[in-house]
Image (tube, rainbow, N blue to C red):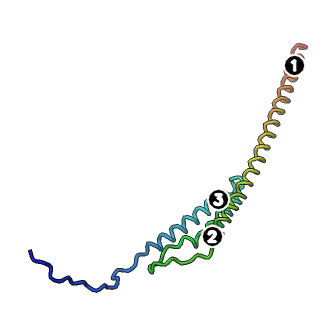
Amino acid sequence: MEPITSVIVAPTADRKTAPSSFGATLRSMANGAADGIAAATGLIGPIAPAGMVLAGAVRSLAQASAPSLRLPTAGGTTPTSTATSSTTGGDAFDAARLLQQESQSFNLQYLELQERMQRETREFTAVSNVMKVRHDAARAAIQNVQ
């Protein structure tokens, strides 16, 4: 076995392959998902209690979080976002708290509506039963006369 006499180190070469567009693809996919969630919330908005408020909050959160989804560029630096995370997080928590309070308010109103409907149903049933008994009694009296 021969000893290694000298080691030759090749000089570094520039990158010969084109940089991947994975970062751009991932960014567009995240933005598409945020837009999709905002659109779905907009469709559910008219149906759900406080849905329009929820749709607006999700849309504003999607727009506020879009700059923070930036990935590092080819140079290794991350672009700075216009919104700081503490401001966005605080606004998100305030919006969530507001949505929760409105949801509780709508739930109470819905419960009151259910109770009124049940009371009205009981009253209708009672009046209906009384009228049926009176009708049956009058009918029996008429049949007895004939």
Q: Nearer the viewer, mark 3 or mark 1?
A: 3
Q: Position of residue 103 (x, y in %)?
A: 72, 52
The mark that comes first in sequence, 2 or 3, is 3
Circles 3 and 1: CB distance less than 8 Å? Answer: no
Residue in front for this viewpoint, 107 or 95: 95
Q: Secondary structure at mark 1?
A: helix
Classify residue 48 as left or right of residue 70: right
Q: Indicate the amino acid at tag 3.
A: Leu
Image quadrant where residue 145 sits: top right
Q: Secondary structure at mark 2?
A: helix
Q: Which residue is mark 2?
A: 64
Q: Is residue 135 above or below residue 35?
A: above
Q: Indicate the amino acid at tag 1.
A: Ala
Q: Position of residue 129 (x, y in %)?
A: 83, 26
Marks 3 and 1 sit apart, C-alpha to C-alpha, by: 55 Å
User: Looking at the image, which residue is at 63% across and 73% down?
Assistant: 83
